[in-house]
Amino acid sequence: MSTRLLTTIRRVASPAAVAALLVTGGTGCQLWPWHVTKDRTTIITPGMRVASIREIGPRMQDAESEAQAKACEQLAMQIRSEPDPIVRRAIQETVGEFQTPMASAMLLAGLNDEDRDVKVTCARLLGKRKEPKAVEPLSTLVATDSDLDVRLAAVDALGAMETKESIAGLAAALKDRDPAMQYAGVEAMKKVSPDQELGNDVQAWRSYADSVVGPAPAASIATQPAETTVK
């Protein structure tokens, strides 16, 4: 497609339409990645890539598993070399709608993304999916990640899974020095252990967690809080 033609299209078409045309090449159905030439690097903006990605989810919602798997594979190829965190987040939000092994694998990998918002998004989506394989990496984030928003998202995701397997990871949240983490840990524990009526007593929840999984180390960036009841 010539540069002159692309310029003409941009005057009359929406950014999403231009992106979609570039992605498909005008023919065929390939989604990602495209073969970028020097002519296109200044035309295909992150916003246009996001717009095109957003269109994939609705198209694939009622598609057969094979089609969803293919879309995931193509998006996985794109995210490996995608420099913009906003685009990577859009990719993860899109694959989060697919019930395929590749989608789960991409979300799990996203927990190691260098961008905070991508990590938060992946944690939230994994909790929503109740992905069993996510318990361990989410627990690791709770105990070791330096960003409070990421740790809170991981705690919420562990609670959303509503499984006793989450207790080991939540125990570290109860030992975090930040009251927000203590509160999130208590609320998550209520979801995974609804049979325990311990209110907002952090110490009581810590003792219960220890009785289930054994004493857990405090988060690496936390210290034992002086007050053990969440207001």
Image (spheres, rainbow, N blue to C red):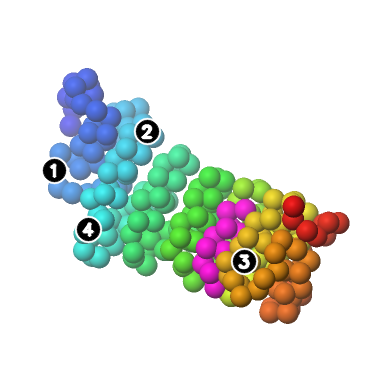
Query: What kind of element bears circle 2?
Result: helix
Dot placed on the residue nearer the N-terminal end, 4 or 3: 4
Is residue 159 visible in the rendered image? The answer is yes
Q: Which mark is residue 62?
A: 4
Q: Disc 2 to disc 3, how far (Cα)?
A: 40 Å
Q: Which residue is mark 2?
A: 47
Dot placed on the residue nearer the N-terminal end, 2 or 1: 1
Dot placed on the residue nearer the N-terminal end, 4 or 1: 1
Badge 1 crowding class, 10 Å Cα cut-off, few under 14, some 14 to 19, many 20 or more, is: few
User: Mark 1 against mark 3, which lies toward the viewer?
Assistant: 3
Q: Which residue is mark 1?
A: 27
Is residue 113 visible in the rendered image? The answer is no
Type of the residue with mark 3? Lys
Span highlighted in magenta in the image: 152-163
Q: Which residue is mark 3?
A: 190
Badge 3 crowding class, 10 Å Cα cut-off, few under 14, some 14 to 19, many 20 or more, is: some
Q: Disc 4 to disc 3, how far (Cα)?
A: 35 Å
Query: What kind of element bears circle 3?
Result: helix
Q: Disc 1 to disc 3, how far (Cα)?
A: 53 Å
Label 3 near label 1: C-beta < 8 Å? Answer: no
